[in-house]
Image (spheres, grey):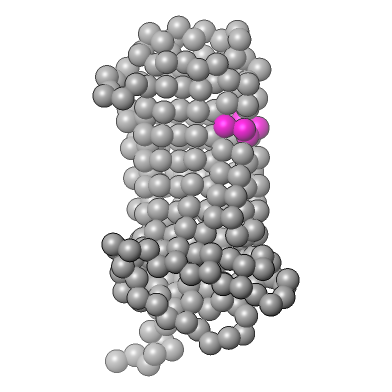
Amino acid sequence: MLPLCAQEQKRSVITMTTAKAEVEISMFGTGTVSIDWGDGKPIETYRLSMSEAYTHKKSYSDTLAHTISIAGNHVVSLDCYENELTSLDVSKNTAITELICFSNQLTSLDVKRNTALTYLHCEDNLLTKLNVSKNRALMKLNCDDNLLTSLDVSKNTAIEHLKCGDNQLKKLKLGKNNALIRLSFYENQLTASTLNTTFKKLHHQNTIEEKRINISGNPGTSSCNKSIAEAKGWKVIE
């Protein structure tokens, strides 16, 4: 049997950096996680559950940057929003299905290895790029209020809800997104031509829920051909 230190090295590690005086993290999963809060104090161990979230608030006595490390192979849901995070690395925890990290200060987020991810909430950050091409199971994506200039969801055939408003998008690439029923990209830089191209990529599928697309606040909103989308059963909000 491997010694404890070797076992720990084999465990998937999530890291995040913050200088906030008090942070709060919530997780679902199975097995145990070991958390190093980055304050020089002993590592703490907790048992996770799929029925009840483990939630912990941590207060720091200084304003230095602290790197928090969470070791555990079966964290399936992580909620770390509003913690003033400047970095977040979940690339080593491939079991994660839900990541909620909105309202932080993230300039990058790598989710290419998180192929089980179904729900990603990363709005209100400072992201300039977001690659979700490997996240084929992704059903809901909210990346509102970032600094994205382009977004490609053509590989995300399972996606149902996409919110990418209040960015700087000049390009939005759709593919065979036949599960999509909510699409919102208000307050971006999309021209009438780009909007028309997007409308042409929308699916014709009948759905139980009304299909809606929000295009308000784009340069091409008033002059684009909304009838392209409406003919496919989409309600256009402008």
Q: Which of 47 and 11 is in front in this view?
A: 47
What secondary structure is the stretch in magenta mostly built from? loop
Could you say which quadrant of the image residue 97 lies in?
A: bottom left
- The answer to whether residue 64 is above or below residue 119 is below
Q: Nearer the viewer, residue 10 or 126?
A: 126
Q: The magenta stretch spans which residues?
A: 165-170
In the image, 189: left or right of 81? Answer: right
In the image, 27: left or right of 225? Answer: left
User: Residue 230 appears at what percent x and percent y?
Assistant: 41, 10
User: Residue 236 appears at what percent x and percent y?
Assistant: 47, 15
Q: Residue 57, can we see it? A: yes
User: Residue 62 appears at what percent x and percent y?
Assistant: 72, 75
Q: Which of 5 and 17 is in front in this view?
A: 17
Question: What residue sits 44% from the left and 60% below the top?
Answer: 78
- The answer to whether residue 180 is above or below residue 204 is below
Question: What residue sits 59% from the left and 55% below the top?
Answer: 82
- The answer to whether residue 230 is above or below residue 182 is above
Q: Residue 113, can we see it? A: no
Could you say which quadrant of the image residue 176 lies in?
A: top left
Question: What residue sits 61% from the left and 39% below the top?
Answer: 145
